[in-house]
Image (spheres, coloured by chain):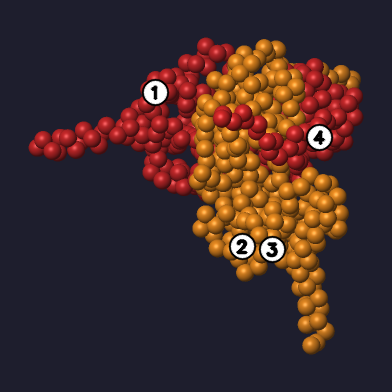
Chain colours: A red, B orange
Amino acid sequence: MDRLGAEKTTMKTSRIGKLIGVSLGPGDPGLITRRAWEVMQSDVHWAYPVRSRSSDSYALDIVQRAGLNMPKNYSPLLFPMTHDPEKLSIYWLEAAQTVLSVLQAGRDVAFLVEGDASTYSTFGHLARTLSALDAAIEVEVIPGVTSFNAAAASVGKPLADVDDTVVIVPAGYGIAMLERLLDDADTLILLKVKPLLNDIIDFLARRNLLAHSCFIEKTGAPEERIVHDVASLKGEKVNYLSLLIIKNPDRQRGEIARGCRKVVRVEEQ
Amino acid sequence: MDRLGAEKTTMKTSRIGKLIGVSLGPGDPGLITRRAWEVMQSDVHWAYPVRSRSSDSYALDIVQRAGLNMPKNYSPLLFPMTHDPEKLSIYWLEAAQTVLSVLQAGRDVAFLVEGDASTYSTFGHLARTLSALDAAIEVEVIPGVTSFNAAAASVGKPLADVDDTVVIVPAGYGIAMLERLLDDADTLILLKVKPLLNDIIDFLARRNLLAHSCFIEKTGAPEERIVHDVASLKGEKVNYLSLLIIKNPDRQRGEIARGCRKVVRVEEQ
């Protein structure tokens, strides 16, 4: 090989790929964005989170229901269901190393995630761990439709009208926090309601909010379930992917400053 | 015309169209969903909000940047910039009547909105006013990517990691409310920051949050602007479509209930 050829080879192999966080929306393949669709159909390596070696990937399920075929190159990445920070950091590191080796081979990696990659997603952990391994890696995030935006659309209730405040809380923080936030929230979105659902139903009954609440399970998926009579769920074991949208129509609102207040500047003479 | 022919004509004209809220995302044509794209290219009547008879529509701008041509039939709907509820209800009624006449002629109407149709959108008002005129009208909402999800993606900061709480507030409610909410918010998203920007910058400085804040203007549009040095904006007149993402890394968190707590049931013998 002549010198020029050797240089060309070096240049080619030294091209580093970028990581692309591809948000797929919450489950309905119609809610995939055009940009996400385009990236998945380009010559990229797919990566996607799985809970265990044997379990299916929900992100992959959305893509397959959309009619896309698996590319030649793909990697399931293991993010198990644990809250132990030490265990998690080992899995994040392993996932980041898998991705890094693909990027170093010059290929872009599309990390497929359900919902939105910036909102309660494994993508943030992966991107941060990868940046810690190599700060020069380029990362692109394609935002997506969240489960609560899709849930509001399915139910036909606005999440927020003009001047409304919206609070999104993992329900596990408990009822005292919900009580406190309710004074300032026109809409409360409770995520991960499963472990506290009975307590939440009691709280909603006490505050006369049952008529303004709605439960949505697996929004956008074929098995989506909408329950308006939230009290009927008492004692039921619901899916992990479920949320409550609670409207708070009786909130006492303060004054609101509108438009553009004039900026007063002291002009120098 | 024979009897059968007359019946056919009657059946045909009695078909009532449905209203479809088509969310377009915040500005980048790549963030339009596949379902929204499909609806716009089907044989529907387009409607879109304008601020005045002479002003452009931001929703239409997104669609045109995406390369779609106007259909034969479309209606700009006037939603002026006023907070007077009486004036607004007159405009909503007029818009709903325009839409209703198209639906009654048997055509579906796609109401094009920037962002997400359930989140701070004119769509909710239109749908409610239309339902008041004719409760039988079918309404479909196609959810979309919100400005704050797209802003987080552009900035490369997660909106929410696992167990995070997110509070979305129109900034005009004032600093006292932000102070109060900060105790329970891992992420504060401040919308409509324009009139209070100087006060907000002082507040962020006082709470040592300037380093954790980011300003984003017209996210997804060609003129998108990201400002990490938020204090540098003091005294500046910013665009109406601008927001702040504020992370609150020092929040004191309580315990969180996780997983599935066993539901205790008294079994009948």
Task: Please tell me which of labels 4 and 1 falls first in the chain.
Answer: 1
Q: Amino acid at mark 3?
A: Ser
**Disc 2 to disc 1, C-alpha distance:** 46 Å
Q: Quadrant of the N terminus of chain B?
A: bottom right
Residue at 57 percent of width and 21 percent of height = B210
Q: Which residue is mark 3?
A: B75
Q: Mark yes or no: residue A63 visible.
A: no
Residue A173 location, quadrant: top right
| Dot 2 alpha-carbon crowd within 10 angstroms: few under 14, some 14 to 19, many 20 or more | few
Find disc 4 in the rendering and name its residue. Answer: A247
Who's the residue at 62% across and 28% down the image? A266
Q: Marks 3 and 2, how far apart in space?
A: 16 Å
Question: Which residue is denoted by mark 2 in the rendering?
Answer: B42
Identify the chain of the residue marked 1, using the numbered disc in the image: A
Foreground pick, B46 / B200:
B200
Q: Chain of mark 3?
A: B
Give SS at disc 3. Answer: strand
The residue tagged 1 is: A135
Badge 4 and badge 2 in a common chain: no
The residue lying furthest to the front in this view is A269
Is residue A219 shown left or right of residue A114? Answer: right
Query: On screen, B145 above or below A170?
Result: below
Residue type at mark 4: give it: Lys
Judge left or right: residue B16 versus residue B39. right
Where residue A76 appears, x then y in whole percent?
47, 31
